[in-house]
Image (tube, rainbow, N blue to C red):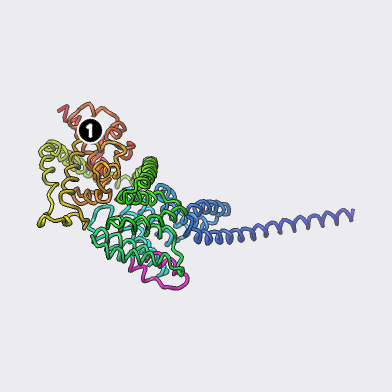
């Protein structure tokens, strides 16, 4: 009996010993796992400079590893790498999708650097997708949060990135080019404040190289190719300096801008040389938007040189890739629209909950205020509606005046001069007149309701360069290409609704398709942006007038 008792005691001690060992090994392995995640993240940061696609794949794996052990810092770091790389490769839909989780994680661990950067990346994604209101709101939030970043070097770094984004936003909403340059210069100034120690060296000179590239691009737009060449050269020198680890994408972007600069100067050999270098490097990370630009300058340069074989080769590559990008954009554009509408619905639900909690007294006051607001809002909407109807009634005479007004240019001694509206682009007066007349014919022909009516397609129709055409539309129509075409489409459908009562019975989705939009949601958002009201309200008012 005694022997059995001793054996049981020994067995129990062994069991407790094993349990304790297992417990401590578990704690130790978790600690190791967090360290392993951190090591992987550091390795991913190095890899991201040369291979964005592989970086995305590995950062997803890293995120899953961190999530298993509930390591929020590791989860956040992995998502931030994904956000940056998805933006770099042009997947703006994914940036917006992931930014919500990044925002929640940043708030949960009070990481102001990543929180500010999340809002910046989301704002930049909205800019690229054309949601200017959302973009501006998120940039302001990013700047506000950046003030809470404790490290001065990190604060300078993230503010430099934000100012770069705002400069791009300003270009998208067609502000004067000096406003764009102002923010580019602010970005450069913030970057120059960062200390040049080992920790900050790479990111400091990354920002400086991007700032020089952006200033070079605005110099091109202002008609100063010599200054543009100087800025591009500075940017390229930084990218190729072995003392700095600058991501490969920046160098490809600079090479691409060099090729377009030389193409515009009719130096086609140099344009092809730089485009070739860019094409070789682009293969390492696959960025379709840049590749499309490279193919375009290649086929146009070969056309100018009379190389039919090469021009046909690159024209085919350009067309195929362009069609692929357009199809992808049609699929991805719906997600951000639904995201915006969903956020607005959540805001409305939150507002209703707060109103219910305030109590009966405040509820009565809120209802009274709401009634006054709705009455005022309806009055404002009706004024907008009446303005649209008034414009539709005057449309025919206004169109005639528009045709004659659009072709006004400056002529001096019969020479070729920059038009004072064309931001320094050298375009012959007769060429400019010809393009503007053709644009008016396009407006009257209603070709713009085609779903594939892209800038490249229109430039081909008008036998001109997409860059020149974009600038002409920006300066003479007062809008970006997308906003210009969207305005024409909304004008077309409002005219149809006004003149043909049958259209008022159609579903919104049919109306959207009829005027060239890919979905009901996009049509509704843009209709409201252009007219100040929803399609349903506009149709309702038209029906109401019919019964009066």
**Relative to the observer, which residue lies in front, 273 or 245?**
273
| Left or right side of 321 for 261 | left
- Magenta span dominant secondary structure: helix
Query: Badge 1 is on which residue?
Result: 539
| Left or right side of 167 for 109 | right
Task: Tell how many labels.
Answer: 1
73 over 336 or under it: above or below: below
- Residue 243, given in percent of the width and then of the height, sits at 46, 70
| Left or right side of 5 for 104 | left
**Relative to the observer, which residue lies in front, 300 or 226?**
300
Inspect the magenta stretch and tell me whether residue 205 lies in it: yes
- Residue 231, given in percent of the width and then of the height, sits at 32, 65
Badge 1 marks a residue whose secondary structure is helix
199 over 267 or under it: above or below: below
**Relative to the observer, which residue lies in front, 533 or 14?**
533
Residue 338 visible in the current orientation: no
Residue at the spot 11% in from the left edge and 44% down from the top edge: 404
Q: Quadrant of residue 214?
A: bottom left
Inspect the magenta stretch and tell me whether residue 412 lies in it: no
Residue at the spot 40% in from the left edge and 60% down from the top edge: 251
Q: Quadrant of residue 188?
A: bottom left
- Residue 420, given in percent of the width and then of the height, sits at 16, 56
| Left or right side of 375 for 183 | right
Residue segment shown in magenta? 188-208
**Relative to the observer, which residue lies in front, 294 or 310?**
310
Quarter in which the C terminus is drawn: top left
- Residue 442, given in percent of the width and then of the height, sits at 21, 39
Q: Residues within 10 Å of mark 1 (few under 14, many from 20)?
A: some
Residue 254 visible in the current orientation: yes
């Amino acid at each position: 009996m005694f022997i059995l008792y001793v054996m049981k005691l020994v067995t129990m001690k062994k069991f407790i010993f094993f349990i304790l060992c297992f417990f401590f090994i578990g704690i130790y392995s978790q600690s190791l796992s967090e360290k392993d995640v951190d090591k992987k993240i550091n390795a991913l940061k190095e890899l991201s400079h040369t291979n964005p696609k592989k970086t995305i794949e590995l950062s997803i794996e890293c995120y899953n590893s961190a999530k298993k052990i509930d390591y929020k810092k590791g989860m956040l770091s992995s998502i931030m790498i994904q956000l940056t790389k998805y933006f770099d490769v042009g997947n703006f839909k994914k940036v917006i999708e992931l930014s919500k989780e990044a925002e929640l994680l940043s708030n949960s661990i009070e990481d102001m650097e990543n929180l500010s950067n999340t809002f910046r990346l989301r704002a930049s994604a909205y800019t690229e997708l054309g949601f200017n209101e959302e973009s501006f709101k998120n940039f302001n939030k990013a700047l506000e949060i950046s003030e809470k970043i404790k490290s001065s070097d990190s604060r300078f770094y993230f503010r430099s990135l934000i100012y770069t984004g705002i400069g791009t936003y300003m270009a998208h909403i067609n502000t004067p080019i000096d406003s764009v340059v102002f923010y580019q210069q602010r970005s450069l100034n913030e970057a120059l404040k960062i200390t040049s120690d080992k920790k900050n060296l790479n990111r400091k000179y990354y920002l400086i190289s991007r700032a020089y590239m952006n200033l070079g691009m605005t110099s091109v737009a202002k008609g100063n190719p010599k200054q543009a060449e100087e800025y591009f050269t500075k940017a390229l020198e930084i990218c190729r300096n072995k003392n700095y680890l600058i991501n490969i994408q920046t160098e490809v972007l600079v090479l691409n801008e060099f090729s377009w600069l030389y193409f515009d100067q009719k130096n086609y050999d140099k344009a092809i040389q730089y485009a070739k270098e860019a094409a070789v490097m682009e293969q390492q990370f696959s960025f379709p938007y840049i590749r499309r630009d490279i193919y375009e300058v290649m086929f146009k340069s070969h056309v100018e040189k009379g190389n039919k074989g090469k021009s046909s080769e690159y024209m085919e590559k350009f067309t195929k890739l362009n069609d692929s990008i357009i199809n992808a954009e049609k699929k991805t554009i719906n997600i951000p629209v639904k995201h915006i509408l969903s956020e607005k619905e959540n805001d409305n639900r939150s507002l209703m909950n707060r109103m219910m909690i305030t109590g009966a007294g405040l509820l009565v006051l809120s209802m009274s205020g709401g009634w006054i607001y709705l009455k005022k809002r309806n009055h404002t909407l009706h004024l907008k509606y009446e303005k649209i109807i008034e414009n539709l009634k005057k449309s025919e005479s206004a169109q005639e005046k528009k045709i004659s007004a659009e072709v006004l240019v400056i002529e001096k001694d019969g020479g070729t001069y920059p038009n004072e509206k064309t931001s320094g682009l050298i375009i012959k007066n007769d060429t400019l007149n010809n393009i503007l007349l053709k644009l008016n014919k396009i407006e009257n022909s209603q070709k713009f309701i085609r779903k594939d009516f892209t800038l490249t397609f229109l430039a081909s129709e008008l036998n001109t360069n997409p860059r020149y055409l974009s600038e002409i539309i920006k300066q003479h129509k007062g809008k970006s290409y997308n906003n210009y075409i969207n305005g024409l489409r909304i004008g077309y459908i409002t005219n149809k609704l006004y003149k043909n009562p049958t259209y008022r019975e159609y579903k919104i989705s049919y109306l959207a398709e009829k005027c060239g939009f890919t979905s009901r949601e996009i049509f509704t958002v843009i209709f409201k942006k252009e007219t100040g009201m929803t399609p349903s309200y506009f149709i309702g008012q038209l029906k109401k007038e019919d019964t009066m």
